[in-house]
Amino acid sequence: MGVFDALRVSATGLQAERTRMDVIAQNIANVESTRSQDGGPYRRRQVVLMAEQGSGSATAERVTYTGVRVAAVEADPSPPMRVHNPGHPDADADGYVLMPNVSLPTEMADMVLAARAYEANAAALRSGREMIRQALSILA
């Protein structure tokens, strides 16, 4: 793997983590949304990432990966929370409201993980750029 390949891998990681942070921000913004376009409360979304395989010749022992990509953004299958709030406009006959299946502590932990992964990819890009700069200064 060359320096440019490593830069490409880090760039795909940056894009994937940015998507994760956008989805997490959307989840946090909709933590109180009891109505969605699908009818019912907002459903938490989660990003599914997939490793990208290189187009070169891969053998059973050695597979070349060229980065990561967002395979899908899926709705979390966990059920919505049922909260007793008889004064809410979306309350049922018993006074319960279906709230989004979004947990703020979980979202904040996911946001920290995504931010750290983003920072790691950015640091790898900076290191690669510096190696290229040093190589060019040696040649000049």
Image (cartoon, grey):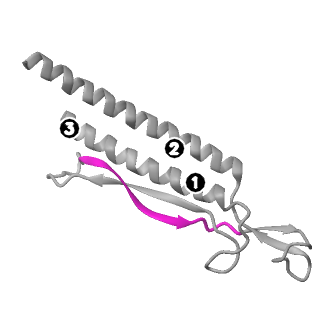
Residue depicted at x 27% and y 48%? 65
Q: Which mark is residue 24?
A: 1
Ranked by sequence position, the earlier of labels 1 and 2 is 1
Q: Position of residue 77 (x, y in %)?
A: 62, 68
Q: Nearer the viewer, residue 138 or 79?
A: 138
Q: Which mark is residue 11?
A: none
Q: Which mark is residue 4?
A: 3
Identify the secondary structure beneath mark 3. Answer: helix
Q: Which mark is residue 114?
A: 2
Image check: 113 left or right of 30? left
Kind of residue at disc 1: Ile
Q: Is residue 91 above or below residue 75?
A: below
Q: Which residues are magenta?
A: 64-79
Distance CA(mark 1)–CA(mark 2):
9 Å
Q: Residues within 10 Å of mark 1 (few under 14, many from 20)?
A: many
Ranked by sequence position, the earlier of labels 3 and 2 is 3
Q: Position of residue 95 (x, y in %)?
A: 91, 76
Q: Is residue 103 above or below residue 91?
A: above
Kind of residue at disc 3: Phe
Ranked by sequence position, the earlier of labels 1 and 3 is 3
